[in-house]
Image (cartoon, rainbow, N blue to C red):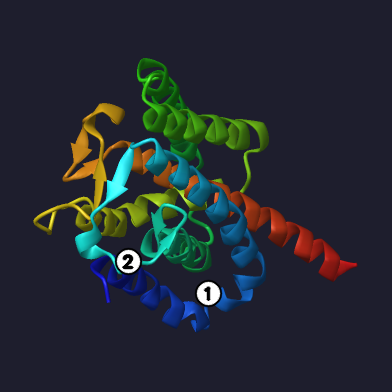
C-alpha cells in the first residue's frame, strides 16, 4: 500500500471506529454528513484536477499506487473524503462534549481578522491562482456566513478548526516532505506566496478552512431540513 494511501487510512481510522461513541453518536450524522462531503468534496476534486493540469502542484509517483482519476492519483481523490470525515468528527465531538463553550467575542474577532487577512493577501497575490482563489474564497464565504447569518454553531466550528490544525500539520507535513526525502505533493514555487509552516504552504491552511467550512455549512443546513421533516 502506498504511503499516501496509508495516510488516508490512518486519518479516517480513529474517527470511523469512534463514530459509535455513546455521547457523540457520530454515525447518526451520516445521513447529512455523507451528502455534504460528496457534494463539496467533488467540487474540490474538480478544483484539484484543474490546478494539477495547469501545474500549480503535482504528485511524486514514488509514494503512489499508480491508479489515477483523470489526472489525479486515487489517493488524492480519497483525501477529499477521508480528511473531511475526520475533521467533522472533531467538530461534532466539540459540540457534544462542550455544548456551552461558545466563545462569541473570540469568534467575532477571529472572523473579522480572518476575512480582512484573506482579502488583503488575495489582492496582493491576485496573479497566483491558488493563493487568490483559496484566500478570497475562504474570506468571502466566512464573511457571508458569519456576518450575514451568525449561526449558533460557528464558534464550535472555529474551536474545532483550530484543533484540527494539529493533525493537519502532521498529515500535510508528511505529504509536503517534512518526513520524506521528496514531497508526496509538490508545489510550483511560482504559484504560491512562499511562506511555509514547516513544509506546508500557508495557502493550505486557508484552503483547508474553505473546504471544511463549506462542508459544515451544507451538513448543518441538511440537519436543519431533516429535523423539520421529522417534526412534521
Q: Tell me: residue 19, above or below residue 90.
A: below
Residue closer to the observer: 145 or 122: 122
Q: Which residue is mark 1?
A: 24
- At horizontal 43% and vertical 35% (from top left) the residue drawn is 134
Q: Is residue 114 shown left or right of residue 203?
A: right
- Image quarter hosting the N terminus: bottom left
Q: Which residue is mark 2?
A: 66
Q: CA distance from mark 2 to mark 1?
A: 37 Å
> Against 26, is 202 above or below?
above
Residue 85: percent from left, percent from top:
48, 65
Tell me where residue 11 sits by quadrant.
bottom left
> Where does the image place residue 227, in percent across and percent down from the top left?
77, 65
* Residue 172 image point, x, y percent: 27, 53
Mark 2, mark 1: which one is toward the viewer?
2
Give me the residue at 37% from left, 64% from top: 75
Residue 137: mark in rendering: none
Secondary structure found at label 1 = loop
Q: Is residue 20 above or below residue 229?
A: below
Question: Which is more toward the observer, 29 or 129?
Answer: 129
Q: Position of residue 27 (x, y in %)?
A: 57, 77
Q: Is residue 176 something one can see in this rendering?
A: yes
The one of 143 and 188 positioned closer to us in this rendering: 188
Q: Is residue 153 visible?
A: no
Report the residue that reaches farthest toward the left: 181
Which residue is located at x 48 percent, y 63 percent?
81
Residue 9 found in image quarter: bottom left
Position of residue 42 in the picture relative to residue 79 (left or right) = right
- Left or right of residue 24, residue 174 in this image: left
Taking the view exactly as shown, the residue that stands out farthest to the top is: 124
Q: Nearer the viewer, residue 187 or 230?
A: 187
Amino acid at each position: 500500500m502506498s504511503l499516501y494511501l496509508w495516510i488516508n487510512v490512518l486519518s479516517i481510522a480513529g474517527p470511523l471506529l469512534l463514530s459509535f461513541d455513546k455521547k457523540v453518536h457520530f454515525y447518526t450524522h451520516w445521513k447529512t454528513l455523507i451528502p455534504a462531503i460528496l457534494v463539496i468534496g467533488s467540487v474540490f476534486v474538480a478544483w484539484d484536477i484543474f490546478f494539477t493540469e495547469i501545474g500549480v502542484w503535482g504528485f511524486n509517483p514514488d509514494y503512489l499506487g499508480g491508479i489515477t482519476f483523470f489526472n489525479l492519483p486515487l489517493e488524492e481523490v480519497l483525501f477529499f473524503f477521508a480528511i473531511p470525515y475526520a475533521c467533522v468528527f472533531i467538530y461534532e465531538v466539540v459540540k457534544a462534549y462542550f455544548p456551552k463553550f461558545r466563545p462569541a467575542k473570540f469568534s467575532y474577532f477571529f472572523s473579522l481578522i480572518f476575512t480582512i487577512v484573506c482579502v488583503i493577501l488575495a489582492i496582493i497575490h491576485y496573479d497566483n491562482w491558488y493563493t487568490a482563489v483559496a484566500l478570497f474564497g475562504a474570506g468571502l464565504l466566512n464573511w457571508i456566513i458569519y456576518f450575514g447569518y451568525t449561526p449558533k454553531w460557528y464558534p464550535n466550528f472555529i474551536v474545532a478548526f483550530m484543533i484540527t490544525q494539529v493533525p493537519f500539520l502532521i498529515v500535510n507535513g508528511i505529504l509536503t516532505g517534512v518526513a520524506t526525502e521528496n514531497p508526496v505533493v509538490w508545489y510550483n514555487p511560482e504559484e504560491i506566496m512562499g511562506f511555509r509552516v514547516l513544509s506546508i504552504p500557508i495557502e493550505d491552511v486557508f484552503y483547508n478552512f474553505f473546504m471544511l467550512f463549506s462542508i459544515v455549512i451544507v451538513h448543518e443546513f441538511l440537519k436543519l431540513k431533516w429535523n423539520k421533516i421529522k417534526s412534521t
